[in-house]
Image (cartoon, rainbow, N blue to C red):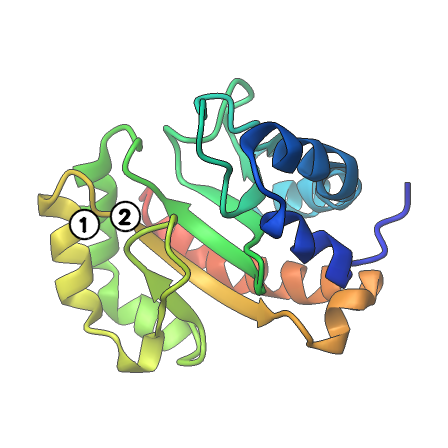
Amino acid sequence: MEFQGFVDEDFEVFHIGGLEKRMEGIRARIQPKFRALGEKLAPRLSHMTGEEMFLHIAKHARRKVNPPADTWLALSVDKRGYKKMPHFQVGLFDDRVFIWLAYINELENKRRFGEKLLENLKMIKETVPGDFVVSADHTKKEGTFLREADLQKMLERFVGVKKEEFLLGKYIHRGDPVLHKGKELEKIIVETFETLVPVYRASFS
């Protein structure tokens, strides 16, 4: 399957009521696109990082009642999963696509990664454009432009607060015509990852 981007019907999946029916929509409409996109992104990201990256597609297996408000693919050095390691994501809410470098609350050695990011605060601010977005919670749509964020405070909270997360990347909002153009969207995602790879590497240094 050739990745051809995302269309309105993909975003409308998140308006389907009920866990099972929404998951049917996600599996039918979105996951095949994630697989097509992820299989192209994995070797590109492996080349950028110098580490083999494995594709994971969110299964939402822990959900028993509430349907997911978003879904995503993840690329990680861990073949068995992605949550315990820093990883790259591409996903959808009902009104946007998100492209993240993600440090979520299930991260192993979370404190160590946060301290490394703090040590590289100056590099992050100099490397990542101000119109990139930061978030402390992957379950919420809200994010803050990097140029407006108190990055040091966010990372200090990430280090000190168990539930705090750190996500850095981009939103592309529903209605942006680039979402319908697979090759152009893929190019934006790759360029976003290229910008974020130095941050990813620094958190391991």
Residue furthest to the top in view is 80
**Crowd tier of the residue under label 1, counting other residues whose Cα lies within 10 Å: few below 14, some 14–19, many 20 or above:** many
Residue 18 as seen in the image, left or right of residue 151 = right
The answer to the question of whether label 1 and label 2 lie on touching residues, with beta carbons closer than 8 A, is yes
Q: Is residue 197 above or below residue 75?
A: below
- Residue situated in front as seen by the camera: 127 or 148: 148
Q: Residue at x 8, y 45 (%)?
A: 160
Q: Residue at x 25, y 71 (%)?
A: 122
**Figure quadrant of the N terminus:** top right
Q: Residue at x 72, y 43 (%)?
A: 30
Q: How many marks?
A: 2
State the residue position of label 2: 165
Indicate the position of residue 173 as horizontal and vertical percent values.
59, 71
Residue 45 can be seen, yes or no: yes
Indicate the position of residue 149 as horizontal and vertical percent values.
25, 75
**Figure quadrant of the C terminus:** top left
Residue furthest to the left in view is 160
- Residue situated in front as seen by the camera: 170 or 58: 58
- Of the residues shown, which amino acid type is indicated by label 2? Glu
Q: Is residue 109 above or below residue 201?
A: above
Q: Quadrant of residue 140?
A: bottom left
- Residue situated in front as seen by the camera: 70 or 107: 70
State the residue position of label 1: 158
- Of the residues shown, which amino acid type is indicated by label 1? Phe
Indicate the position of residue 80 as horizontal and vertical percent values.
52, 18
**Considering only order in the chain, which callout, 2 or 1, is on the residue closer to the N terminus?**
1
Per the model, the C-alpha gap separating discs 1 and 2 is 6 Å
Q: Residue at x 36, y 65 (%)?
A: 142
